[in-house]
Image: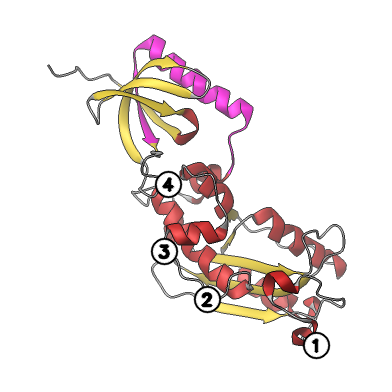
Amino acid sequence: MTPFLELELAALDFETTGLSAARGDRVIEVAVVRGRPGREPQLWHTLIDPGRRVGATHIHGITDAMLAGRPGFSEVLDELERQLAGAVLIAHNAAFDLSFLEMEYARVGRVAPAPPVVDTLGLARRVLAIGDHRLATLCRRFDLKRQQAHRALDDARATWELVQALAAVADPSATAPLEAIQQLCRRRTPAEHNAVLARLECSRTGRVSLLVDYVSGDFPDRPATRRLITVQRVTRSAVAAWCHLRDADRTFRVDRLRIVSEEPTPPREG
């Protein structure tokens, strides 16, 4: 299976007249940054006449005058579709951009494409032990340069670079397939959290060690570390275990821990 970081990635970003496609807000700028990691990506963007007042100039700096004479969304739709075709769609808070994509397609009587999606907001929430996951905060954390925040092209370029940085934290071996990265983008449901707790408790009672990937709260920028643990006690939020990597007792937050496999418990030295 092809690793995620060897796939064609297309970062999409919209600037809009407001925050709700359902309430009639429209797209006024779109950008796609597309390419394979490790290579210089292709850049495409355009301003769009929404057929109404901009209304949110204080956020993105786009004025009604800047949009006069620009194409409508229907006129750029075919090119946008070509830009996204065959690639994994990347977006920060993907639900927002997808809602506008679907709305603009519906306005012209067409069905929006449904490519595989990776949401950098969801991925950051899972693999970084920080409380602020805004694009600006994450760009500072990974030293990603932006010329003009809240403009589609710069935000799309930042998102394209950010997903690679986050994937490297989540998967230091760079071998994880798309499906594994997509799973990390989702917050665990209560059922999924309970399933992890059950596996931890089963390993404790069965005296079987677990190989896990763990993101440290002390070093959230560093890649997840793979370590062998022998579980000693499990609560809803934390697991106390002997860490064979550190050769010491450690406590791990369950939401930062991903179980890789069960392993025989090696004898302790000393």
Residue 79 x, y percent position in the rendering: 68, 78
> Which residue, given by chain and number where applicable, does mark 1 sit on?
68
Viewer-nearest of discs 4 and 1? 1
Which of the marked residues, 4 or 1, is nearer the chain's N terminus?
1
Residue 170: which numbered mark, if any?
A: 4
Q: CA distance from mark 4 to mark 1?
A: 44 Å
Q: CA distance from mark 3 to mark 2?
A: 13 Å
User: What type is the residue that disc 2 sits on?
Assistant: Gln
Element type at mark 4: helix
Residue 239: which numbered mark, if any?
A: none
Q: How many marks?
A: 4
- The magenta segment is 186-213
User: What type is the residue that disc 3 sits on?
Assistant: Asp
How many C-alpha atoms fall within 10 Å of the one at disc 2: few (<14), some, or many (≥20)? few
Q: CA distance from mark 2 to mark 1?
A: 24 Å
> Which residue, given by chain and number where applicable, does mark 3 sit on?
143
Element type at mark 3: loop
